[in-house]
Amino acid sequence: MKVAVAGGAGFIGSHVCDVLLEAGHEVFVIDDLSSGTRENLDCRIPLHVLDVRSAEAARLIRHERPEALMLLAAQMDVRRSVEDPRFDADVNVGGLLNLVEAGARNGLRRVVFSSTGGAIYGEQDYFPAAESHPTRPCSPYGVSKAAGELYLGYYRQQHGLSYVALRYANVYGPRQSSKGEAGVVAIFCGKLLGDLACTIYGTGEQTRDYVYVGDVARANLAALSCEHVGPVNIGTGVETDVLHLHRKLATISGRGKPPLFAPSRPGEQHRSSVDNGLAQRVLGWRPEVNIDQGLTRTYTYFEKRALRSGTLPVSYSVPQ
Ligand code: NAD
């Protein structure tokens, strides 16, 4: 199948490209490289450096006529969305409309949309949240993702365009950037490799549902060809707190100064986890990598990368 991957040079998108290629799909990427990099991407995949909001990106979709669109490109910084909700909506809603409008009239049959399980439900009434849990996003980012889902519902009704909105929990793994706010695992790995103390906001007892990026990529592949239409949670249903993450990574790395504690960040959710029962039923998907295995793989990836680039402190010795 010919598949356009918007945001394919990013953390999750590049892993999605890897599994698509391996499954024999014809893939091309649209990415403005605002947070993604060319190095993330398999060199066999054509990369079009374009903004998803641009007329050129719409023209490319009309010209290439992909059968499927994996939409991962987004403004995904929650704090930025609070500071500048118009920019957030411009990229997350405007970008979606630009590509889907172009595609819906030119052979596009399926959209796999990267939505959010962490930000769409707001403070949860119960744990883990099913897809039927009320959506009460408490940031413009959560609102723009919910709006994206609603627009796709409209295109389904009016244009017969089929879609799945994958509501990811907290995704972590190789290639994640430590620059954003979401990547606590990547941030802690960077600190440990630099022999620096990690900062924990609040008590560290706040929980998230951490799902490994390789599992998320497999969910995208399954979503491409299944019959299901609508939202599907992609998470483990398991809550892990930040203190556990830190302890585990400190053990894996064989180092780790005691963490620093800072005041909790305003508006931060206390707990979050999503139920993956629907994903099991409609995608035949379940997570295969547990948190301890995933953290080991992720730390090893960052360590190898730092060794290659010669950025480790001289005192660093590779744990046996
Ligand atoms: P990422 O920043 O690594 O990937 C986003 C990619 O989109 C980057 O390559 C970036 O350069 C590109 N991009 C951004 N704005 C663009 C624009 N205007 N035009 C073209 N390309 C643009 O982030 P990620 O963690 O891989 O997230 C991918 C998707 O998954 C996003 O839609 C995000 O909202 C969603 N998501 C991520 C998580 C998570 O835990 N990482 C959780 C829930 C949902």
Image: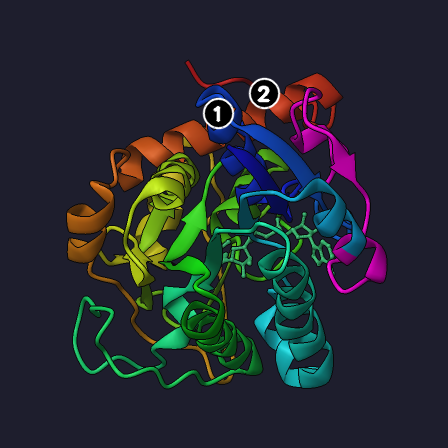
Q: CA distance from mark 1 to mark 2?
A: 6 Å
On residue 71, which mark appears? none
Amino acid type, mark 2: Lys
**Quadrant of the rendered image holding ligand 1:** bottom right
In this rendering, position of residue 98 left or right of residue 192: right
Q: Look at the numbered discs 1 and 2 and tell me whether their residues touch, using CB distance below 8 Å.
A: yes
Which residue position holds label 1?
300
Q: Residue at x 81, y 51 (%)?
A: 50
**Which range is magenta?**
37-58
Classify mark 1: residues with Cα within 10 Å, few (<14), some (14-19) or many (20+): some
Residue 277 spot, x, y in % from top left: 15, 55
Which residue bears the numbered disc 2?
304
Question: Where is 303 relative to 234, above or below?
Answer: above
| Numbered-mark total | 2
Foreground of the two, 251 or 121: 121
Vertical placement of 312 versus 317: above or below? below
At a point 57% along the width and 39% down the height, the residue shown is 3
